[in-house]
Amino acid sequence: MPETAPAAGWYRRLLLALLLAPALLWLLGLIILPHLDLALLSFRERVAPRTYVASLAQYRSFFSEPLYWHVFVRTALLAALATALTLLLAFPIAWIIAKLARGRMSALLLLVCLIPFWVSETVRTLGWMILLRESGVLPALLVRLGLTAQPVELLYHDATILVGLVYTSLLFMVVPLVGSLESLDNSLIEAAYDLGAKGGAILRTIVIPHAAPGITAGCIVVFMLTLGNYLTPTLLGGKNSFWFTEQIYTQFITRFNWEQGAALGFLLLALSTAMVRLGLALSGQRFSDVMRRA
Amino acid sequence: MSTTPNRAPAAAPDLEVRAVAKRFAAHLAVDDVTFSVARGSFFSILGPSGCGKTTLLRMIAGFIQPDRGDIAIGGRSMAQVPPNRRPVNMVFQHLALFPMMSVAENVAFGLARRGVGRAERLRRAEAMLARVGLTGAGGKRTEELSGGQRQRVAIARSMVLEPTLLLLDEPLGALDLKLREHMKIELKQLQSAFGTTFVYITHDQSEALVLSDHVGVMNHGRFEQLGTPQELYYSPATAFVAGFVGASNRLTGKVLAAAGEFIELRTRGGWSLRARRHGSIAVGADAEAFIRPEAATLGRTAAELPPGHSVHTGEVVSLLFDGANSAVLLRELAGQTELRIALPQTGAFADLTPGARIFFSFDPERAICFAAAGAHA
């Protein structure tokens, strides 16, 4: 019946719109509109009380004030280091879960990786503080073992920040790695071994090329999470953590300089996106492939 | 029957397996297997799934260590030698080509591991691809190739390393029937062209018969019989081999009488037939006889049948037309036993209809009878 066909098409479109409505409203109201507002904020400058003019001054100050971009470079380097450490630590774990453990054991191991996430990030980080502070568990243990004469302060070092970040990120690296290693056919490893390859060559020529999308996906997620993390660097690094998100927080909350804070927020978004693109280009991966296969 | 391997029949065997055994928990996968494979020959291990043939092959490749016994390749014991150091390469069941590499890189993989320079290994890979009829395919991705081409890449990848022994783990299993028939012939030709010793495992008796110089028939972790395809087919050593290798009619019953080489068997339904006995079978014992479909002759009248053999009567149940493998399924009238008998190539019996009465006879020499399992030993 030709008359009903357009009606059916109209009905289908309405249904689709209704189904998508909650997600679209969420996207519009809580993500797009605030970002537009912040973007407008970032492109103006206060010249007198309650008087604003359009200006690029906020963006200019990022490059002219060494503190801002020094902190950004430091944050990016530490985040990249944390990502690399997470990958090194997560790879053997993922290998055990995907290839060595069988059936229920591998599900159990994945659950063990998940358990820390049953506790909120604040509580987890405070747990680290209890362990690492000068009067805490680990310094006391070092004294008891005779390794240090006095309790040492283990908090507020860059290494402490890295420990906290790696701990928080591990699961987000393990999950995509397990996925990509599970899909690796064991007979490929055996074939490589049979053709004369040793462990290192098998890892380099077979395992890593196969797992590359999973590795890349995990690295992107961990890098973005780490770069944008506020709580862990601030609590474990203390006043001297110099994390970029802390600068944004300071502009908004301490200085009431929303214009500068908004500009720094957009710079973080732009620069981290650029770094991810660079990483993808260097590893020869495509973003759509990575998201599809991971 | 003496069949000689292609070349150098007197040379030392390339593979010697001596009293090898392997147990997995309570399951004895390979139980005291001994055999040797002459240089340049095609040896098959034939058996149903779960018979231990894959375990045996993986022990030869080095992926599994035997509990007992020794494996020597090219005269050298392989105990404590890991798979990447053995002069053996394997063609895997699903070929296991590396999807992250081009065809040429797949073939050059083993050479790269041996430290052969890039230009040299690509030259040798191309030369090997040319030998298996894949000239110019080196730049392709493995998934661009057809099933048969992929198989040739898998063989080329192993053969470029010039192994003493090539192991093949049911490589034809994943192919469709038409391609399998084609690859069977191709595999045979490749083997004789390379002159390398092939050890092939399969559950498909036709592959084993067509391809091999020698076949070991394996069941429950043991070799039931080791011989040429002709020996397995015409003089099976055990009831298992008679039933597993080639098509056969299996008849069970009791021995009525024995006279020299021959016995008189009476089936449960009451049909009496004469068969050649294999080993000693007591009168009154349970026994099973095997008659190949082509061992029996059909006739519309008893007079048409060759003289000297007892004549049996049957009723056609159905005609199984399959070109050169056509057969008739009939019910023998004395004992209501169903038998499959091959139709002659002349098409003389193509007009048989279900229910038709027909006569048949067979040479008792070609009906082999074994004591039923459990009746002796």
Image (cartoon, coloured by chain):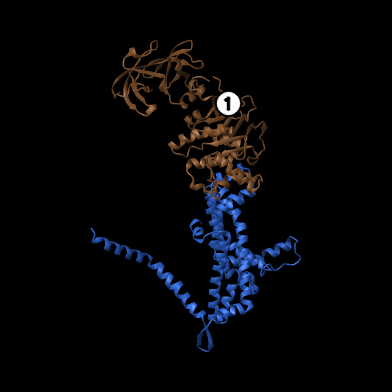
Chain colours: A blue, B brown
Vertical position of residue A97 compared to residue B359: above or below: below
Q: Quadrant of residue A148?
A: bottom right
Front in this rendered view, residue A64 or A131: A64
Q: Is residue A191 visible?
A: no
Q: Chain of mark 1?
A: B
Residue B17 in percent (x, y) is at 62, 30
Vertical position of residue A69 compared to residue B335: above or below: below
| Label 1 neighbour load within 10 Å: few <14, some 14-19, many 20+ | some
Q: Residue at x 49, y 45 (%)?
A: B145
Residue A195 in percent (x, y) is at 61, 42
Q: Residue at x 61, y 70 (%)?
A: A75
Left/right of residue B175 with respect to residue A11 in the rendered view: right
The residue at the far bottom in this view is A48
Number of numbered discs on residues: 1
Q: Residue at x 61, y 53 (%)?
A: A92
Residue A207 in percent (x, y) is at 58, 51
Q: Which residue is mark 1?
A: B5
Amino acid tagged 1: Pro
